[in-house]
Image (cartoon, rainbow, N blue to C red):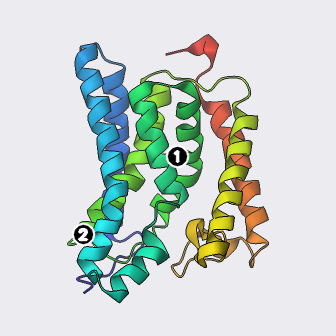
Amino acid sequence: MILATFQHFGASHILALAVTLVAAYLMVRFMRSDALEKLKTRVRYLFAGLLIFAVSMDPVLTFLRFGTGETGWLVFWNSSLPLYLCDVVSIVAALALITKNYKLAEVAYLWGLAGTTQGLLTPTLAYDWNTLDYYNFFLQHSGVPIAAVTLVWGMGIIPRKGAFKRIIIWSWLYMATVIAINFMIKQNYGFLSGKPAFDTMFDYMGPYPYYLLTLQAIAFTMYFILLKIAPTQGNKL
């Protein structure tokens, strides 16, 4: 049962965006502060745990809402497998927060800000603030961009030479893998086999399959810009 209908840039959406911006600022400030490293480590691990929790809660919430019968399993296969880019980057960001690995961090930074931010601005979300779905959605989709800026501007894990080439390869691998899975299970994860039913930025990218080319052009341009604005080795935090 839908208790409320989520509206793009309605009050609950704007509040979530505002909380995201404030939380990102506070996380960066905290990681750059003189706080004990032990405390920073605990915060990093907690943050990583919340990202993984959000991904794992998606199928749980599906079964809670639709039951474990035929409808519940149908919705699970349709939308609750962790194959969306936001699911993958949530796990990558969590691992980057734990390990401080620079290759994981650069993927989290570029996919998180170029990809997940789009989902944050135009959410494929049907449920509003008085549902668990709302809070879990923004825990993940706000958490990833927050983690991205925390890793780069807060912790100083700066993308290294070759990051642009690596992220393009990872993006193509993700697209090829998910398109193949979509074909095999007849689904539309990553919205790579058709546009979502909700109003999103995909609506301005042309018809299928041409919007996949537009999507890549936009994504690669954003990767380039994000790498340009990231701190450099000469300006390491």
Classify 10 Å Cα crowding around label 2: few (below 14), some (14-19), many (20 and above).
some
Q: Quadrant of residue 155?
A: top left
On screen, 227 above or below 74?
A: above
**Number of the label disc, if any, that sits on residue 159:** none
Mark 2 belongs to which amino acid? Trp
Give the left or right position of residue 109, taking residue 204 as reference. left
Task: Look at mark 1 in the image and give the residue it sits on.
Answer: 112
x then y, percent, for residue 69: 30, 86
Mark 1 belongs to which amino acid? Gly
- Residue 144 at least partly seen: yes
What residue lies at 66% left-to-right and 23% top-to-bottom? 160
- Residue 17 at least partly seen: no
| Quadrant assignment for the N terminus | bottom left
Q: Quadrant of residue 141?
A: bottom left
> Are dots 2 and 1 in contact, CB under 8 Å?
no
Classify 10 Å Cα crowding around label 1: few (below 14), some (14-19), many (20 and above).
many
Task: Look at mark 2 in the image and give the residue it sits on.
Answer: 129
x then y, percent, for residue 193: 67, 74
What residue lies at 37% left-to-right and 39% top-to-bottom? 24
On screen, 164 above or below 61?
A: above
- At mark 2, the secondary structure is loop
On screen, 156 above or below 98?
A: above
Give the left or right position of residue 223, taking residue 122 as reference. right
What residue lies at 71% left-to-right and 55% top-to-bottom? 218
Q: Nearer the viewer, mark 2 or mark 1?
A: 1
